[in-house]
Image (cartoon, rainbow, N blue to C red):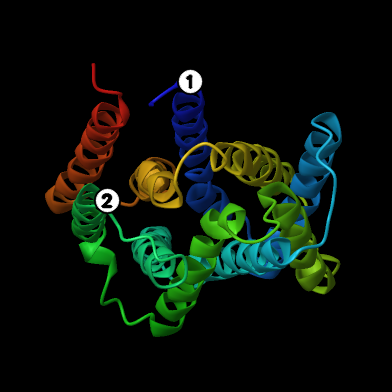
Amino acid sequence: MFGMNNKKGLILMLTCALLLSLGGVCVKQIPWNPLSINSFRSIISVCILFGFAKLTRNRFQLTPGVLVGMVGVCGATVLYTVATKLTTAGGAVLLQFTVAPVFILLFTWLVFHERPKGLDVIACLCIVGGVLCFFLDSLGSGRLVGDAVAVLSGVSYALVFLTNKLPGGNALWATILGQSIGALIGLPALVQETQFDRGTLFYAIILGVFQLGLAYVCLTTGVKYVKPVTAILVTGIEPVLNPILVAVVVGETLSPLSLLGGAIVFVSVMVYNILSARGERPRP
């Protein structure tokens, strides 16, 4: 049944996507080393998530699921920040997003023996196609290192959505641990930064509070109520909104092909949710 929990999960994942889309424009505005940026935002985010864990009485227990999720969160946050600095914001989020849903489908099929539904596969292909159109201009830029890092961040990102399917999985504590490690990795670089003007701190705090902290509150709660592939597909609006915000604030231009790709992603996500809702309703 497509009940309140499922709707709650979809709303949380959509909110998560909106918050995550702030990443590109904020990272581009901060003149720090990418590891410094991730360390600063992770410190803030961990405080928010730890408070949320206490508020919801979510107890910590070290399990295989938490460890795998920890690796995924750490890789996704650190590698995405680095990739955004090394390549375009659009290219980074494109490669992360196109790798993640495919890896989720393969992982759930090979490890959990859950064959993907036709609707999941079609939606995945449509969204990947739309995202490819949207960022076609950013590909082939010769920034191979940044592109490779973005691909690895996509593999890590997929693990985040699979955390709750693993033994003892707890997405919230996996996120707290993963972001804590990310903060420690970048701490040596952060203490060497010298530019702490109002603009820099403003964007860094936005990253920590909204783009990482509250976004992962929504993500770790929302994935409890929807399938991993549904969660990643619903967040398909992030790779569209992310470079749009960069275009508006930083001044990057959008081509007609990019706008077409954005429309494909948006329509695909909406149609997927409508068809999923119909398919989940009990027959009279």
Q: Quadrant of the N terminus?
A: top left
Identified by mark 1, the residue type is Met
Q: Height in image: 273 above or below 72?
A: above
Residue 167 x, y percent position in the rendering:
66, 61
Give whichever of 8, 130 is nearer the camera. 8
Separation (CA) of disc 2 from disc 1 = 21 Å
Q: In this rendering, would 224 be left or right of 35?
A: left
Q: Which residue is mark 1?
A: 4
Q: Position of residue 163 (x, y in %)?
A: 60, 57
Residue 186, given in percent of the width and then of the height, sits at 76, 69
Quarter of the C terminus within the rendering:
top left
Instruction: Return the disc, 2 or 1, that comes first in the chain's sequence.
Output: 1
Instruction: Give amino acid for label 2.
Output: Asp
| Residue at (40% x, 73% y) in the render | 110
Q: Position of residue 21 (x, y in %)?
A: 47, 44
Residue 94 visible in the snapshot:
no
